[in-house]
Image (tube, rainbow, N blue to C red):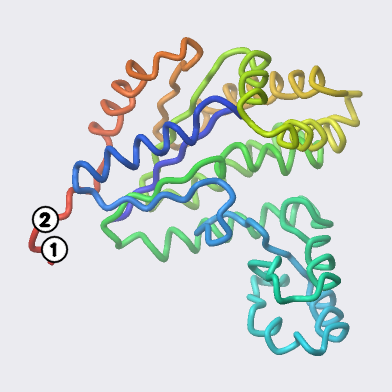
């Protein structure tokens, strides 16, 4: 049976570092590992560059772009009463078409939060059904806590209870994969964000600040600039730490505030060794 390992934490907490470590550790043990980093357009559960359209919106787009009608119709996937168009930034599509689809992006477009949560929960259920009989560990970052927080809290300023209900629904959808959650807690976000900003291009910080203070929660609470970003992340940390005990997922919370990754890796390995159900591939199976 396939198993799902999810790595979460605030920006700069070390999600990519921890995820890469887990992948390497699994490979060393001969365990099939499939890691999906944040932002991949081929992500098995998340919606990166995916447009969500009603039937009427799809028909209008097909009518407005007759040269791309056939390809668009083939690309569109029906999910109950809405349609998904994946990989919406295809370079050979006209800029106007890409702009139209961008305006209907699952995360950043004009998609109601109740539609967003419904299609994401459906995606997680489909993923679990599709891979459950595989002998592999799927390793994902950001999609279980961070992205729901961004969509529901930062963007739409929805109540914490609504966020909690959505995350629990994701956990229930993933239940056939016996999911494990690794939550990295770096302590107060201010120094962590400052360190992350110093290591990344300036446009990263500009984007993150604008996203978290320039819409939804940030506007409702009068947040501004880097200090506003820190205030949001402090709130997010509180929300996530309060949510973790109620989730039907076996969870390891790692205090990474001291930067001692060698000690944290030892805790992480002990957690995984006690709970992973996927075994190493035998030579016979490998052949």
Q: CA distance from mark 1 to mark 2?
A: 5 Å
| Mark carried by residue 140 | none
Residue that sits furthest to the left in the current view: 284
What percent of the width, then of the height, locates residue 250?
39, 33
Q: Label 1, secondary structure: give it.
A: helix
Residue, disc 2: 282
Q: Where's residue 121, x and y in %?
A: 59, 55
Left or right of 97 on screen, residue 49: left
Residues tagged 1 and 2 counted as in contact (Cβ below 8 A): yes
The answer to which quarter of the image holds residue 225 is top right
Residue at the (27%, 42%) spot, across then down = 26
* Quarter occupied by the C terminus: bottom left
Q: Is residue 131 visible?
A: yes
Q: Position of residue 44 (x, y in %)?
A: 50, 59
Q: Quadrant of the rendered structure where residue 68 is?
A: bottom right
Asked whether, in this view, residue 282 is left or right of residue 189, the answer is left
User: How dense is the environment of label 1, judged by Cα within 10 Å: few (below 14), some, or many (20 and up)?
Assistant: few
| Residue 251 against residue 279 in the figure, above or below | above
Residue at 47% x, 17% y: name it: 256
Q: Is residue 31 left or right of residue 152?
A: left
Residue indicated by mark 1:
285
Q: Decide if residue 29 is on the left or right side of residue 100.
A: left
């Amino acid at each position: 049976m396939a198993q799902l390992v999810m790595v979460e934490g605030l920006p700069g907490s070390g999600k990519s570092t921890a995820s890469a470590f887990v992948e390497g550790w699994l490979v060393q043990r001969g365990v099939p590992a499939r890691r999906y980093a944040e932002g991949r357009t081929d992500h098995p559960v998340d919606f990166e560059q995916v447009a969500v359209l009603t039937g009427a919106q799809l028909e209008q787009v097909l009518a407005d772009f007759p040269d791309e009608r056939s390809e668009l119709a083939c690309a569109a996937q029906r999910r109950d009463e809405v349609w998904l168009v994946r990989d919406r930034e295809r370079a050979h599509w006209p800029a106007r078409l890409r702009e139209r689809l961008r305006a209907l992006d699952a995360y950043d477009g004009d998609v109601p939060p109740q539609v967003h949560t419904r299609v994401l929960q459906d995606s997680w259920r489909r993923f679990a059904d599709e891979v459950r009989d595989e002998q592999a560990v799927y390793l994902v970052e950001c999609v279980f806590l961070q992205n729901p927080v961004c969509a529901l809290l930062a963007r739409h300023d929805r109540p914490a209870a609504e966020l909690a209900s959505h995350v629990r629904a994701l956990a229930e959808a993933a239940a056939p994969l016996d999911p494990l959650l690794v939550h990295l807690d770096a302590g107060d976000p201010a120094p962590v964000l400052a360190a992350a900003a110093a290591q990344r291009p300036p446009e990263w910080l500009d984007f993150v600040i604008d996203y978290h203070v320039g819409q939804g929660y940030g506007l409702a609470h009068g947040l501004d600039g880097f200090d506003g970003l820190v205030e949001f992340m402090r709130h997010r940390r509180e929300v996530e730490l309060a949510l973790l005990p109620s989730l039907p997922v076996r969870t390891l919370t790692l205090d990474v505030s001291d930067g001692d990754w060698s000690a944290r890796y030892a805790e992480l390995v002990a957690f995984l060794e006690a709970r992973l159900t996927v075994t190493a591939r035998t030579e016979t199976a490998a052949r």
